[in-house]
Amino acid sequence: MKRNSMLTKIIAVLLCALMVAAWLPKTSAAANDFESGMDRIYGTDAANAMPLVIGTNADSGLANAYYAYTPAENGTLTLTAEDGTTFTVDGVAYTDAVAVTAGTKYIIVATNEAKAYSFTAAFEVAPTGPVYASVLDNTRVALSMQDKINATFVYSTSKIKKEAYDRVWLEVKPYDADSEIVATTITEGVGGNNVYEFGVWSRQMADRLEVTLYAEKDGVTYCGNPKIWSVKEGAEERVATYIASGDSAQANLYVNMLNFGAAMQVYFNYRTGTLANMDLTEAQQAYATAETPVIDVTPPTTGKDNYTFAACSLYLADRTGLQFVYRMPSGFDKDQYSVAVTMDGVTTMYPFGDDSTSNRGILIYSGLNAKQMRKEVTVQLYSGDAPVEGSPLYTASIAAVAKSRINGTNANLAAAAIAMMKYGDSVLAVYG
């Protein structure tokens, strides 16, 4: 009899245990332990304990935001991040949410005194964007301008092994809200190497760039910290360096360059509150070229027929160049024509640009770099493989066109043309 009574008690205990186990709350996959040794402890009233859920809230309006939900009935939620930061929320309902940070490990404790239970678990919120990798900070931004003004972004090949990633790329975007710089992704370095170049217009020297290096491996995107930089900043550093070292020619070049950038800002009325040369000291400005450059070239113009050379002007927008305009028959097909440009005995054929009109053929030639502003080029109109009969040869240079602008009535354009020639002459003096 006693044996049967004992057996009955054992069976009753086992049945109770099975019933309690059946009522134990289930944790979501996102709330599973990410570290060994984490406990899940439930109180005596586990049947009424609401499970802890980690997930996204579709109604929050925050894409990929992760939330921790607390138990009902005066529950208390404590979150501890891996850096030791802790915060507690009392008396929140089960449907309330607390935002947590993507890419961070948390230990979470949820308790309900009224129901006498607690829940402890560890979870890690999956990253919603690129994962920061400090190795990608091993980069520097510099200035290069022998051919054109470039922001040059160079990453350390000793720290960042390109072959270790599936791909590496650079993103450039404007840091200043009123900048006209267009966000650009550069997928290939110069020559396939570790140097990325981003061209900056003359009037954009004071615009700050935000540049970030990215890398991808096995479907995961990594990034370094963004670097904020401007051509103005790079040129100012070089001015200070060359003055300190006694290299007056280089100091002259970079002071002239900043003055050119400022003059272009004034001419285009672009961000004139932050001029490129505004932070140069009086002592630094003393290294600028004082005299107006002497220009003694006047290009000839000939031809009177229907295919008449109409104009040659300076092009000063995204690059510095020469704009050649031909007067063409109304409704002409621009694809049937091209312009032969000869420099140093080498002739290259260029099509008319998309900015041509129904009776004007327009070519913007930017094959001259800063040190070639005084170099002459000769142009002639072609139809197919032959010159157009009666179309004139025309010889021009940036300097020759600048001369007419310097002597013109537009004071801001004259100042920009003078600053441009000073800059070009100083580049020629340094780089030959």
Image: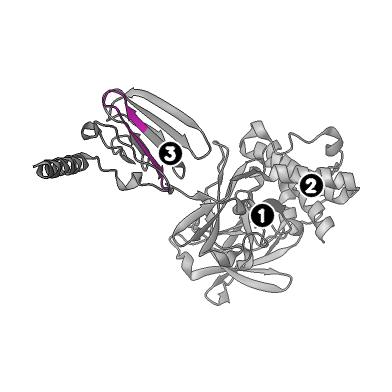
Quick one: label 3, few (<14), some, or many (20+) residues within 10 Å? many
Residue 320 shown in magenta: no
Q: Residue at x 79, y 43 (%)?
A: 255
Is any atom of residue 17 visible in this view?
yes
The part of the image, by quadrant, that contains residue 381 is bottom right
Instruction: Give me the disc on residue 54.
Output: none
Which residues lie in the magenta part? 110-126
Q: Amino acid at mark 1?
A: Thr
Residue beneath label 2, please?
238
- Which secondary structure dominates the residues rendered in magenta? strand
The part of the image, by quadrant, that contains residue 268 is top right
Real-space Cα distance between discs 1 and 2? 15 Å
Mark sitting earlier along the chain (3/2): 3
Percent x, y of residue 176 = 57, 37
Q: Amino acid at mark 2?
A: Arg
- Mark 1: secondary structure: strand
- Mark 3: secondary structure: strand
Residue beneath label 1, please?
152
